[in-house]
Amino acid sequence: MSAIRPVILSGGAGTRLWPLSVPARPKQLQPLTGARTMLQETALRVADPVLFAPLWVIAGQGHAAAIEAQLGEIGHRPARLILEPAGRNTAAAIALAALEAEPAELLLVLPSDHVVRDVAAFRTAVRAGAALAAAGHLVTFGIRPDRPETGYGYVKRGGALSDGSFAVERFVEKPDRETAAGYLADGGYDWNGGIFLFRADRCLEELEAHAPDILAAVRAALAGAEREGARVRPDPDAFAQVRSESIDYAVMERSGRVAVVPVAMGWSDVGSWDALHELAEKDSAGVARQGDVIAIDSKHCLVRSDGPTVVTIGVENLIVVATGDAVLILPRGQSQRAREAAEAIGKRESGEQAG
Amino acid sequence: MSAIRPVILSGGAGTRLWPLSVPARPKQLQPLTGARTMLQETALRVADPVLFAPLWVIAGQGHAAAIEAQLGEIGHRPARLILEPAGRNTAAAIALAALEAEPAELLLVLPSDHVVRDVAAFRTAVRAGAALAAAGHLVTFGIRPDRPETGYGYVKRGGALSDGSFAVERFVEKPDRETAAGYLADGGYDWNGGIFLFRADRCLEELEAHAPDILAAVRAALAGAEREGARVRPDPDAFAQVRSESIDYAVMERSGRVAVVPVAMGWSDVGSWDALHELAEKDSAGVARQGDVIAIDSKHCLVRSDGPTVVTIGVENLIVVATGDAVLILPRGQSQRAREAAEAIGKRESGEQAG
């Protein structure tokens, strides 16, 4: 089997981890669970040269220097760094990678901001997925649900393939709570973790079949690309024309040859401060401290500072996150509302510019 | 009646309003309830030249420049600025003022960090007190209790004097809750607000009678003082020998000629974040916002920032105070615990210096 090309998608600028994650320094460029940034952790996960070819990264233009610096700190550099002039979601990003690759190349597409605790399990699953991908399948990795999560898509397992893999009967979009509880009880549904493995040419065939406009627009943007060393900058005007769509919706939900490799690898997308509280090391009172924090008589809290000294006294079930610029305080269990803070700030700033 | 000399005591460096109040910039040098600092508000309260002589200030050496600058901003400057080389509590501070004054001068001693909403009532009470002081009484102003407060001393009214004033039957130290509730029910007890009015020579006589060691040590420190314009710097070595004692304990509780002038003047010592929450303007959800604050779906909170943008979402009954250096979060009703934060920081810093 030829080496697998890791393609790290670093285009997101999530607001669910505001105020830590902001457009200028998004979540994946931050250390969340340890000393290394999420991007660094992701790169190290696919650094084994026996299994993997040198990695590619697809990212926003503004993050090029930070990405090269962070990979440099761990002794790596991207073999190709494709810099999007604007975010156009995952279908466009993956089309960029598939068009740049050799036709028979196996591409392992992975988000830059997920936690995987069991890297050995991840690699075993990748090996199983690579065999399926070489045979022409579009492979997704299925995460066993442990709760009725409404924030992820699900894949329903169909007939068994080799090595504990399955054909995918169907993809389902983020369900409501009752539906999610049904999936959990059913046992035949896995979370779609957003990690994919396929041959470059198979990916292009499916894009051609299901989203030809996206493929054509990305191809045009690449034809006009500037290239400088490892950096590739698609033509901004052409790329601006690309339809913004997820690869799930554009291809995976529509394709007839999708396979799922279920894997238990201690996965989390760290999609909220609550998720980080679950992952983080906690003291006997359930308090996770990160940074310059003093928690007195406090219980079941996440208290994080990337700036000032933060002191909590006598509080319970709170999320407190401080940077040099901003502080967020909300109850544990409601941390998805961090978005509201980012939105309020955004609204205020655009109002200030208008006024 | 001759003009009354206001003597503002600015020596405190309270930790109850940590992290806003720290030794380098204590509470009285901060704006707490409006645009002006507590010191500025206090100075303006005693600026009427018909009633008051030019003011004196007694403060820590490190604050001289800040005090002159803040008074300058409101068009004032201290006629005398007595700079203590170290804090030695109120008996020493008042002894400094009494020794500097003319014997027959009336001294109105007032803390620099209290709120008085009704300045007209304050001045009326001062006029009544001045008559008593001129006749040889040591006058304190009695604040009508509206709750069984355990954080203040009380004065028990004795026989009636002129103009709604009373002889003081006794001073009592900070009572326990049950005792405080009894005082409240009794109706004959007022809070000792720490504002005093007396002739300089009467004050010195009482110090001589009840705390001669303090008076002698302060006199020695003043004999060696450096003087430069309005500034007076007592000799540091001599002042270091002064016993640290409150004027209440050293004199007022022991003297036979203390009078109390009860006054309803919208007084608060703003002794805690809870007190500030009570005083502050609040929205319909009971949230007091000060500085760069966004409170979403939050109730009955004090949220203050002197630095970062602070966002609260879905929280109730919290005190949140942020500066550029530190953030404090604790439940409303427990804000006296801010001290614990200041102590923890102090302990850590001394540990760092030792280690």
Image (spheres, coloured by chain):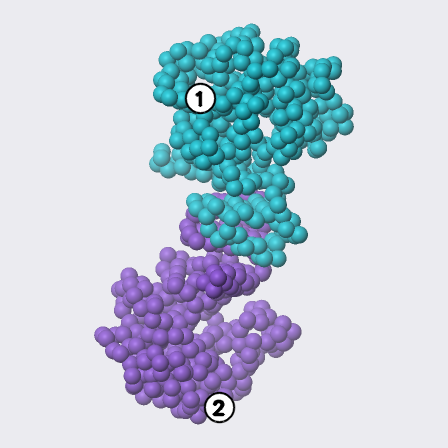
Chain colours: A purple, B cyan
- Residue at coordinates 39% horizontally, 11% vertically from top-left? B223
Question: Measured from the top left, where is residue A233 in percent x and y?
Answer: 30, 77
Q: In which quarter of the image is the C terminus of chain B?
A: top left
Q: Can residue B214 be seen in this view?
A: no
Mark 2 to mark 1 CA distance (whole Å): 89 Å
Q: Where is residue A271 in the image (x, y as percent from the top left)?
A: 49, 66
Q: Which amino acid does label 2 sit on?
A: Gly
Residue at the extreme bottom: A209
Taking depth in this image into account, of B260 and A196 the one nearest to the observer is B260
Residue A282: give its label.
none
In this rendering, would B120 be left or right of A230? right
Residue under the point 34% across and 71% down: A61
Query: What amino acid is at disc 1?
Result: Arg
**Residue at the farthest left position:** A229
Give x and y (percent) for residue B226: 36, 17
Read off the chain for label 2.
A
**Residue toward you, A257 or A125:** A257
Q: Residue B80 carries which label?
A: 1
Both marks 2 and 1 on one chain? no
Can you give x and y, in whole percent of width and height, for residue B336 in the image?
58, 37
C-beta proximity under 8 Å, tags 2 and 1: no
* Residue A222, visible in the rendered structure: yes
Is B267 situated above or below A355?
A: above
Within 10 Å of the Cα at label 1, are there few (<14), some (14-19), or many (20+) other Cα atoms?
some
Tag 2, which secondary structure? Answer: loop
Q: Residue at (46%, 32%) from the top-left corner?
A: B75
Which chain letter goes with mark 1?
Answer: B
Per the image, label 1 sits on a secondary structure element best described as strand
- The residue singled out by tag 2 in the image is A256
- A55 versus B25 height, above or below: below
